[in-house]
Image: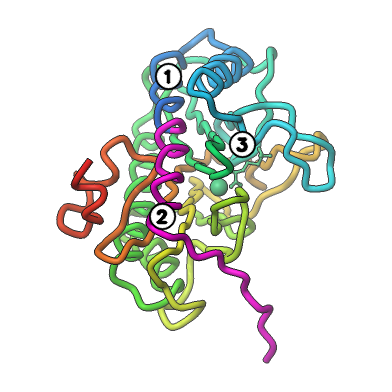
Amino acid sequence: MFRRRQHIQYKTPEQIRKMRKAGLVVAEVHQAMRESAGPGVTTAELDRIAEHVIRDCGAVPSFKGYDIGNGPYPGSICSSVNEQVVHAIPSEDAVLKEGDLLSVDVGAIVDGWHGDAAITIEIGQVAPELTALREACEAAMWAGIKAAGTAKRLGGISHAIEHSVEHSGEYGIVTGFGGHGIGTEMHQDPHILNYGRPSEGPKLRPGMALAIEPMLTLGSEDTAELADGWTIVTDDGSVAAHVEHTIALCEDGVWVLTAPDGGVEQLGDAAASAARAE
Ligand code: MF3
Ligand code: CO
């Protein structure tokens, strides 16, 4: 069996500190999104706020102009509502309403280094099953992040995410998309499946920086792309959740670069000393 050679970019501690700066910009945008998102607000407004915060920090929005062959992405965020899973373009027509589940994905570049993370926000009061879906998605992400500190191979992260979801309830794990390496580009090797076996994939080593991003649905794991060439929706119209953090594997633990506290609260002693020293 042939396996494509992985081109993994290993970062020095100094470079990881640079990525932390980008991560903190992303975290600041998330905070602004939490404060601004609500019934009656359009996703275009959220996009303007996000770009403002990013540029105010002296950073560059990495999504804007990003091109994977279908033309440049127009926004600074992806704002995916309900059955939209990821990559939905902000729009003046997308007015948030009570009960919506919104995923906001943000990327920023500082000094050539990327941060990429997403949060799922409840708009007003949402149905209890949507809260449970969001919580299951967050739990899966943290299970993956914790596994990054203990697993031998990348598959250990994938397996931990899958296992966490199974433990949480009956959810579809989106199979068509996953996490990724990140560094001087937003998307680098390795691709990170949100399901798999611990024995699979490249070895986890200090210096790796990874974006961990599970996507869960209340129904099918299958997705479709809309005619705009970007928006990914669930095949069956069920509601989806999506959360993401950029993490770095350090010599002595994991640093959650896009979390305000570096992941210390969730990881405790498993957090890198650099995160605990901040
Ligand atoms: N954070 C997204 C991901 O990892 C990237 C957004 S795609 C863009 O898939 F076009 F918006 F940049
Ligand atoms: Co990502």
For the residues labelled 2 and 1, the Cα–Cα distance comes to 32 Å
Amino acid at pointer 1 = Ala
- Residue 162: horizontal and vertical position, in percent? 41, 64
Q: Is residue 71 magenta?
A: no
Tell me if 90 is positioned left or right of 168 in this view.
right
Whether disc 3's CB lies below 8 Å from ligand 1 is answered no
Amino acid at pointer 2 = Glu
Mark 2 or 3 closer to N-term? 3
Q: Which residues lie in the magenta part?
A: 1-26
Q: Is residue 209 above or below residue 107?
A: below
Identify which residue is drawn at 48% across, 11% down: 39
- Which residue is tagged 1? 32
Placement of the N terminus among the 4 image quadrants: bottom right
Placement of the C terminus among the 4 image quadrants: top left
- Residue 203: horizontal and vertical position, in percent? 45, 78
Q: Quadrant of residue 71?
A: top right
Q: Nearer the viewer, mark 2 or mark 3?
A: 3
